[in-house]
Image: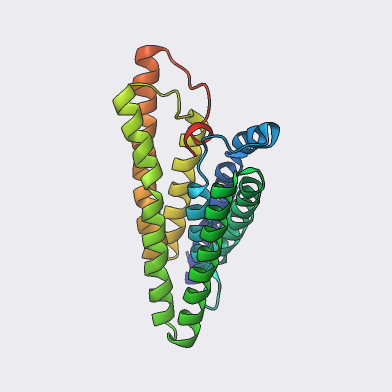
Amino acid sequence: MSEVDLFSTYSVFSYAAGIAGNLLAFVLFVSPIPTFRRIIRSQSTEQFSGSPYIYALLNCLICFWYGLPIVSPSIILVATVNSVGAIFQLIYITIFITYAEKPKKLKMLGSLLAVFAVFAAIVFLSIKVFEPPIRQLFVGYLSVFSLISMFASPLFIINLVIRTKSVEYMPFYLSLSTFLMSLSFFAYGMLKQDAFISVPNGIGAILGIVQLVLYFNYSSSSGEMPRRPLLESYA
């Protein structure tokens, strides 16, 4: 096989992994929809917290910036998936603010402004202070920190399942989608030789495997099926 053929095959596999990651991420982006249907129906945010969507928005914005050509060449699929993710989070946050009581409303508005301020500062610093390839390193480390901080949610789910010996709040398809998305972007990062993508998503894939093992262990031992998404009750 010639060098050109190898390069072509490499490109096909890398783009396939990236596109698969984009499609699987969409499943995660739409998973909170039942929560927000309930909020709209009741016209109240009840006991739900808006913080996960604030953190998710910041994570999507940072990773979106990292995936743009001005920061990182040849990983545009990272930018596309996070741009879609940011739009979904903004919609969720807008709905939450609309129906929240005044104290929650003000807190969410303040948090949203803080997210935009942090993101604007990151963009400004990365353009005005850092030149390539240092710019990619600066934003890359921030994206890794942001992604790893998002793993607090899977760790919480794992702890909850072990503690309660119940998979009620860990839907199988959501766990499977999380695992497959992380695995896809891990492969994408490896093929692109980008540790800022492969390392955090490799960790995410491992946590996804743990969730699936726990699911089969506790659902088979108790014959239990999850009744509602975890995000609906704990988001």
Q: Residue at the spot x=34%, y=34% of the render?
A: 158
How many marks can you see?
0
Identify the image's colour scheme: rainbow, by chain, secondary structure or one colour.
rainbow
Residue 117, given in percent of the width and then of the height, sits at 52, 70
Residue lying at the far front in this picture: please name it.
Answer: 102
Q: Residue at the spot x=55%, y=43% of the render?
A: 28
Q: Residue at the spot x=38%, y=16% of the render?
A: 220
Could you tell me if residue 193 is visible in this image? Answer: no
Of residues 218 and 46, the one drawn nearer to the viewer in this rendering: 46
Q: Residue at the spot x=38%, y=23% of the render?
A: 216
Task: Classify 195 as above or below 102.
Answer: below
Task: Classify 190 as above or below 126.
Answer: above
Task: Classify 107 as above or below 228.
Answer: below
Left or right of 213 on screen, residue 225: right
Residue 31, given in percent of the width and then of the height, sits at 58, 39
Residue 61, given in percent of the width and then of the height, sits at 53, 63
* Residue 169, picture quadrant: top left
Of residues 218 and 95, the one drawn nearer to the viewer in this rendering: 95
* Residue 154, picture quadrant: top left
Could you tell me if residue 141 is visible in this image? Answer: yes
Residue 122, given in percent of the width and then of the height, sits at 47, 74
